[in-house]
Image (cartoon, rainbow, N blue to C red):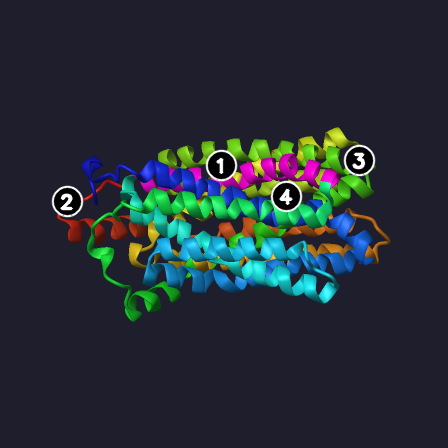
Amino acid sequence: MKNSAMINPGSKLILSVLYLGWIVSYIDRTVVSLALSKIGDDMSLSAGMLGIVLSAFFMGYAFMQIPGGWLADKYGSRRVIIVAVICWSIFTAFTGLAWSLASLLLVRFLFGVGEGGYPAASTKAISDYFPAAQRTKAQTTMMSSNALGAVMAPIICTPLLVAAGWRHTFLIVSCLGLVVVACFVLATRRAKTISSDLDSKPSKGNYKELLSNSLVWKVVLIFFFSNIAGWGLSSWMPTYLINELGIDLKSAGYLVAIPGIISVMGMLISGRIMDRIGTKVKYVVVCCTFVFAIFLYLVSVSSTITEVIVYQSIATFCASFTSSFIFTLPHRYMKEKVVGTAFGMINFGGQAAGILSPMIMGFLISASGGSYTSAFMFLTVSCVLAALTTLTLPSKKQMAAIASSKLNDEVSNSNTPPLHVSH
């Protein structure tokens, strides 16, 4: 393990750029949800077809998660990040040029492939540029950008959608990715990765050990079920506010931003709490996931805008604790040689949910004659399943033993004293 003297002097700047990259990626993927009703009107698409359009992104995104992690572990995070951001920016622009349902589906799939390399690569970058003691905080700080992206997307994009139309909006926001690439190249130009035994490439044995790790697969399932709710909400909430509650597009965009602000706070708070409670986090995640389910149900039976936004805000705040646990788990319990691949596996579970959730919700809405009640109940049940799966995670002592084994293995290779793991 590295001491404070080994902290990369440019690590904070790199974290800031990674944070910006996540915000831009979230803006680029969220603008389609904000534009969904307009796209449906222009192309005469039903709710079921629009659900497939939303899911097309997640098909490409999920497809690229594990390869993206493997590429980051093998070739380094820097190269993968640069290529990923350039690719997704190109296909963001192409979304605005789509002329048919088939072309829209193809472009959104390829856009998802482009974005799919970024999550694991950015997580690998945290390992590359931060000492182990700072990675949990750095990771949760970076991932709070998702919620901030949810806040900024409607604030930036809804005025553009109203003023310029959905096609020109995609062309405009695609330029943001090029800014990220330029900033990242400059930030990492002279930065050196933290020296360790992990500079060597991962072996087949490392991958075999990872694939046989039951903890990883359980977390994959937890992220799958919890992200069914997360992506279902973010994908359909703007359309729900417009169609069911009669809100105009601009107002819907601003209202959707409120739960995003709450979620940013939740991510930042939860990361620091997890550093304190250590292996007891399992029980916090179970409680928060059950609360998430309860408030999703309340959203489904609410009749006023105020109730919907308040209940959604509470739900997303609780969901942030689950997200923090999932996003930091590779740094806590996986060997650094395969951090990128481990995160890719876990994120694959979450993004596979993104394939199914918007599509299933779209068909449920169509089948019920436009009612959103059954769709929200579907999200509620998925949260309950996430909570039940969390209960199957190893006990507090077993989790502590896994963490201790990882830490002691690393310090034995870096010739520093063993670290204490909080129980």
- Observer-side mark, 3 or 2, equals 3
* Element under disc 2: loop
**Residue 158 belongs to the span the image colors magenta:** yes
Q: Which region is colored magenta?
A: 134-163
In percent of the image, x 46 and y 45: which residue is there?
180
Cα distance in 3D space between marks 2 and 1: 31 Å
Cα distance in 3D space between marks 4 and 1: 18 Å
The disc label shown at residue 335, or none: none
**Badge 1 is on which residue?**
267
Main secondary structure found in the magenta portion: helix
Along the horizontal axis of the image, is 356 left or right of 249? left
The disc label shown at residue 247, or none: 3
Q: Position of residue 39 (x, y in %)?
A: 76, 52
**Badge 4 is on which residue?**
293
Along the horizontal axis of the image, is 342 left or right of 246? left
In percent of the image, x 42 and y 58: which residue is there?
216
* Element under disc 4: helix
